[in-house]
Image: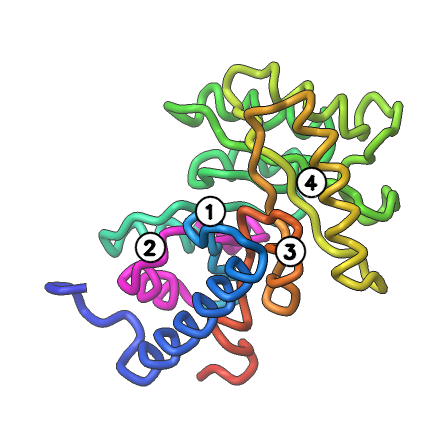
Amino acid sequence: MTGRPDPVGPDRRAALTAGLAVVRTRIADACAAAGRDPAGVTMIAVTKTYPAGDAVALTGLGVTDLGENRDQEAAPKAAEVAAAGVTARWHFIGQLQRNKARSVVRYADVVHSVDSVRLARALATAAESGRDRPLETLVQVSIDGDAARGGALPGAADADRGLGPVAEALAGLGSLRLAGLMAVAPLGWEPERAFARLAEVAEGFRAGHPAATALSAGMSGDLEVAIGYGATHVRVGSALLGMRSTLR
């Protein structure tokens, strides 16, 4: 951050530095337990509800990947971070409505939450005119099969919401690139059960899409379990940035 004003102040910077050290240690320990190289796990700092100053400060601490789940917050925040003269790789991780596709493709480098063929097509159309490179996409998987909670449905014949049709759509649209899968542990499920199920789905999925190796799974409370089951991306908010209600 040399030559730029401090976006957060010394106390907040110290808190972010300490949180980052703890999370990086947790990831390293989980990788050691799983016999994996920590370089194979990307930490996404989920900055939703936190100010752009925190995002700028994190980039100064070596964090390159930032996550948001609402376009209304993400679009202006990404613009503010860019205006501060820093570069970040933005991940859109929340439920996405088709009418937000045109906005999201302007700043997001990766969209984790594609769960329908209709959304895939909306993103592709927006990316054709709104980007100069393909948009990386992940299919959000429904682990429990509850379509109401979002996520493509493994094994389903549904032409719009089935995992197979969504993946095929993403793989066949030139302005998009199919990178892998994403999932959230369902409410009421133990992380072990949820991510074991996800690993099964991922194994079958990669048989048909061998280049789509990304697996976005695990958050502040369950990242170790997710890494044990092959997560390549973990989405960390409170463990890194603290509880938003306590910030001033």
Which region of the structure is painted magenta?
51-75
187 above or below 216?
Answer: below
Q: Quadrant of residue 106?
A: top left
Q: What secondary structure is marked by label 2?
A: helix
Residue 246 belongs to magenta span:
no
Q: CA distance from mark 1 to mark 3?
A: 13 Å
The amino acid at mark 1 is Gly
Q: What secondary structure is marked by label 3?
A: helix
Quarter the C terminus occupies? bottom left
- Identify the residue under disc 3: 226
Label 1 vs 4, first from the N-terminus: 1
| Residue 179 position within the rendered picture, expressed as x and y whole percent measured from the top left | 55, 31
Q: CA distance from mark 2 to mark 4?
A: 27 Å
Question: Which disc is residue 81 wearing?
Answer: 2
Q: Is residue 106 left or right of residue 207?
A: left
Residue at left offset 49%, top offset 34%: 105
| Residue 94 position within the rendered picture, expressed as x and y whole percent measured from the top left | 63, 49
